[in-house]
Amino acid sequence: MLNDLNSKLRCSLVALSLPLLVLTIVPLVALLIGTSPAELWQGLQEEETRKAIRLSLETSIVSTLITVLIGTPLAVLLAEPQFRCRNIIDRILQLIIVLPPAVSGIALLLAFGRHGIIGQWLAACGITIVFTPIAVVIAQIFVSVPYFVKAATVGLAGVDNEFKLAASLEGAGPLTIFRRITLPLAWRGFAAGIALAWTRSLGEFGATIVFAGNFPGRTQTMPLAVYVSFESHFEQAVTLSVILLAVAVAIMLVVHISTTIQSD
């Protein structure tokens, strides 16, 4: 009797889930069938498309590496329940996630622009960040770092302290404990965070166009190129969209494979 009830409940839930499945799956299918392999190849031959792809890949890889480097220490702190500022920093990260992208760009402009809080001092030293590839990287880091930190924090918080305590009693130092015990056990959280940060960097649009501008070959990433070519060259927009989708899927597969190998 219980199995029959579970079966009926499952069928009802599937029926209720169909609208959401249609809403999410159909647009992806439409994107994939919206261009032929020949059109996709032709779009890849255009110089502006190749420049946008190259810039997106280069900046997103750099921003992800920096995000992991500067985000890991913060994730370690947030994973400690005794850390007093834990809730405040967590709320700040949540605020960045829900902040409208254009507002993020304005905030970065006011901070690192020529007359910004930090930018004016950099300008006095002859350093300009706005409308450069560096601005693209900063914008990507700003919007993606909360995703990495939160995912890594969850992974770190799940590590049993007894393992670290046992290693400490054996004479292992903090760095050794982190490298040989904590990181391997929290690897799934780190991998998920890296994937989220990387894909978020690749898809960043609002903060980039406000803070870095939209200059082909210099600051025009793939999302910006999609926006520009939407009206004038729709085939190019579709090509770039398919490439972004393919890269996102590839990142997810790499993370899934790496975590599977790590767990085995």
Image (spheres, rainbow, N blue to C red):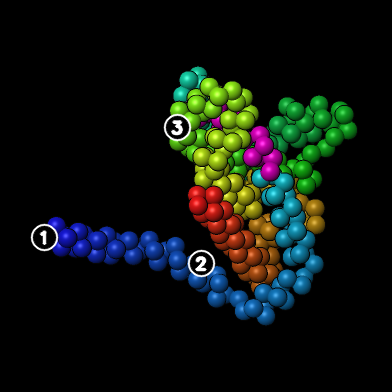
Q: Residue at x 53, y 22 (%)?
A: 169
Query: Which circle's residue, 2 or 3, is located before the other in the chain?
Result: 2
Q: Residue 234 in the image: x percent, y percent?
A: 65, 70
Q: Quadrant of the N terminus?
A: bottom left
Q: Residue 120 in the image: x percent, y percent?
A: 80, 28
Secondary structure beneath disc 3? loop
- What residue is shown with label 1? 1
Q: CA distance from mark 2 to mark 3?
A: 40 Å
Q: Residue 38 in the image: x percent, y percent?
A: 67, 80
User: Which residue ends up furthest to the right in the rendered image?
Assistant: 126
Q: CA distance from mark 1 to mark 3?
A: 41 Å
Question: Hey, what amino acid is under mark 2?
Answer: Leu
Secondary structure beneath disc 2? helix
Query: Which circle's residue, 1 or 2, is located before the other in the chain?
Result: 1
Q: Nearer the viewer, residue 42 or 163?
A: 163
Q: Main secondary structure of the magenta part?
A: helix
Q: Nearer the viewer, residue 142 or 215?
A: 142
User: Which residue ends up furthest to the left in the rendered image?
Assistant: 1
Q: Quadrant of residue 31?
A: bottom right
Q: Is residue 178 left or right of residue 118?
A: left
Residue 1 vs 36, above or below: the answer is: above
Q: Residue at x 77, y 70 (%)?
A: 46
- What residue is shown with label 3? 160
Q: Quadrant of residue 122?
A: top right
- What residue is shown with label 2? 28
